[in-house]
Image: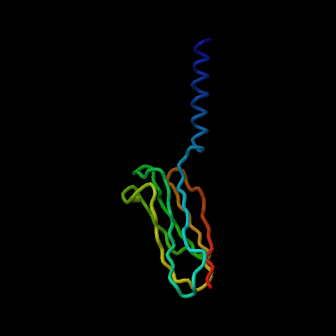
Amino acid sequence: MKQKFTITGIVAFLALILFSTGAFANKTSVKIVVPEKAEAGTEITIKIEVSHMGNSRGHHTDWVWLKINGKEVKKWVYTKDSLPDDANFVLEYKIKADKNLEIIAEGDCNRHGSKGEDKVTVIVE
């Protein structure tokens, strides 16, 4: 009886660990930092703040992309041999603001995926 209880406890514990890992998964997140408004014809810098706890050869941010007005304009790719500099890092992209800019960015962890896109709009006057 005692052995049956022990085996049941171990199986329950393993099931709990197996099904709860998604809740603790470390997904890559991004935050876009830009001015709310820009003067037509000026150059603005788009900053993408990327966050992912730890970047090792086996567990790291593997890509971050940037779309402006529906078109992918830049994709940064990382591998086990070319890792990001730190767990939190900033990417920059410069663009001339000729019209309103809908900016979308997303990053991905090679094991756990993404926390989703960040999206902002810059009004060009």
Measured from the top left, where is residue 98 in percent x and y?
Answer: 58, 86
Picture residue at 46% right of the left edge, 67% below the top = 91
From the image, which quarter does the N terminus lie in? top right
Picture residue at 60% right of the left edge, 63% below the top = 117
Taking depth in this image into account, of 45 and 12 the one nearest to the observer is 45
Q: How many marks?
A: 0
Picture residue at 60% right of the left edge, 39% below the top = 20
Residue 13, placed above or below residue 91: above
The chosen color scheme is rainbow
13 displayed left or right of 92: right
Picture residue at 61% right of the left edge, 17% below the top = 5
Q: Which residue is situated farthest in the left direction here?
A: 81
Residue 44, placed above or below residue 60: below
Taking depth in this image into account, of 69 and 110 the one nearest to the observer is 69
Q: Which residue is situated farthest in the bottom direction here?
A: 41
From the image, which quarter does the C terminus lie in? bottom right
Q: Which quadrant of the structure image shows residue 23? A: top right
Measured from the top left, where is residue 52 in percent x and y?
Answer: 49, 54
Residue 56, placed above or below residue 121: above
Measured from the top left, where is residue 70 in percent x and y?
Answer: 61, 75
Taking depth in this image into account, of 122 and 24 the one nearest to the observer is 122
Measured from the top left, where is residue 116 in percent x and y?
Answer: 60, 59
